[in-house]
Image (cartoon, grey):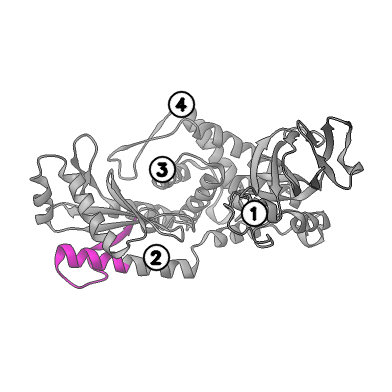
Amino acid sequence: MKEFDAKKHFLKFIRNLKTSDEQEEIILKRVAKITKVINLEYWEIHSESRNSTLVGSYGRGTAINLSDVDLLIKLPENQKQRFTTYLNNGQSALLQDIKSKLKEVYPTSQIKGDGQIVSIKFSDGIGFEILPAFPILGEDGYEFPDTHNKGSWKKTNPDRDQQLLTAKNKQYKGIVKKFAKMLRAWKNNNNVKISGITIDVLVYNFVDTWNIDSIESCEFDEMSRDFFKWLYNFTECQNVITSLDNSYNISLDESINSKASTAWNRAQKAIKEYANKSTAENEWIKIYGKKFPIYETQKGNETKNIVINSISNRKKRKPIGNAKDTEEFLEDKDWAISEHIKIVTINAELEMNGFRKGSIRNFLKIPIKTNSKINFFVSPHRNITWYWKIRNVGETANRKDNIRGQILKGTNQHTEPINFKGTHYVEAYGLSEKTVEYFGKIEVPLEDI
């Protein structure tokens, strides 16, 4: 049995979180294009670089490949004066004005102006949040519009936040920003209600309280365990934390406490099981998601390979014609397949007037009659949540626009009325948290009689 190598695993994990070169190129091109529009419309100059700066996670150097892009655009003072003269919520009018300019350049993208930002959602999933801001004369920072409560101007100093976090990162030899990236993966994998700036502030505060012999000897497994313990204890007694520059308070959602507790327990288990690489890997995957690497002999895992080849997937699906695409696939879910996945038998009993109740395996074809149904069931397992997929296949399903195929939460039993002529298949997924531990599949041929 191989031991878990924390240094090797977490080094690879951090690399996996990096924004790809292709994605970075797309982001920079869009930054340049948006900047060009703003400069032309509000500054009357031709420039793809002046008067804009990356802020948020990208600006602080803590973004991962799923992070939205925060872009601060500087506007001339006369524009603030222009919108301040509005009788009703000039701040909202400013956002709508910027939105209309960007809509001319990105007519098919989803663009909204609300709150403090103009947001753009591109078809490839990359999101931009654009913050219009006015430099404050005689001091650091910017004023930006807030449309809430009839509109007002608020202050921000992203440059100061970047300086403070960079200094702390340098003090702790680069681990601050790396760990903040890891926690974004934890947030995404476990639906933690926490913002990017809140993560950075928490890490900023945590490292000063962390008792370690030396930074050089620290490992991210121990840091993870100790952080989640600290966060659990912190949120037990506090629901706010002060911003990096101490200028405002950040509220902490009450659900963070239980999320931290769960992660702390899993990290403890992973470290305790370091001698069993597979167990340790699975626990870290539950915390940090699919980007966490797996090295444990998955090549020799024949059962997993069988399951992967058996599970329905979009690439192997036969054409559905003009039918509405209602089908869901495991690949659409934020689920991982366990390295130790087990294949379960889906038992199916037919209930029909004129037929004795019994297994459908006794029938080559299953007749369709009124008030008939099939009861599917698998053996129950502790702490497992079951999901079922019923998929009608073939020309009849396509023509009747009835392919179905949604993955629905249930129990270890599922009852299906018989009302469709043709073949369909049933898949069962047994999950522990977001990991598929059990899988079963059965084909069900149906015909009229």
x and y percent of residue 388 in the render?
70, 41
| Crowd tier of the residue under label 4, counting other residues whose Cα lies within 10 Å: few below 14, some 14–19, many 20 or above | few
Which-is-in-front pick, marks 1 and 3?
A: 1
Question: Between tags 2 and 1, which lies in front?
Answer: 1
CB atoms at circles 4 and 3 under 8 Å apart? no
- The residue mark sitting in front, 4 or 3, is 3
Region in magenta? 32-55
Residue 58 visible to an observer of this rendering: yes
Q: Does label 4 or label 3 sit earlier along the sequence?
A: 3
Task: Please report whichever mark, 1 or 3, sits nearer to the chain's N-terminal start.
Answer: 3
- Residue 74 x/y as whole percent: 21, 58
Label 3 is placed on what type of residue? Thr
- Nearer to the camera, 47 or 180: 47
Tell me what residue is drawn at x 64 percent, y 53 percent.
Answer: 399
Please report the residue visible at 81 percent of the width from the left and 37 percent of the height from the top: 378
On the picture, is 147 further left or further right than 332?
left
* C-alpha distance separating marks 2 and 1: 40 Å
Residue beneath label 3, please?
A: 198
Helix, strand or loop at label 3? It is: helix
Q: Where is residue 235 shown, x and y percent of the image?
A: 47, 31
Q: Earlier in the sequence, mark 2 or mark 4?
A: 2
Q: Which residue is mark 1?
A: 398
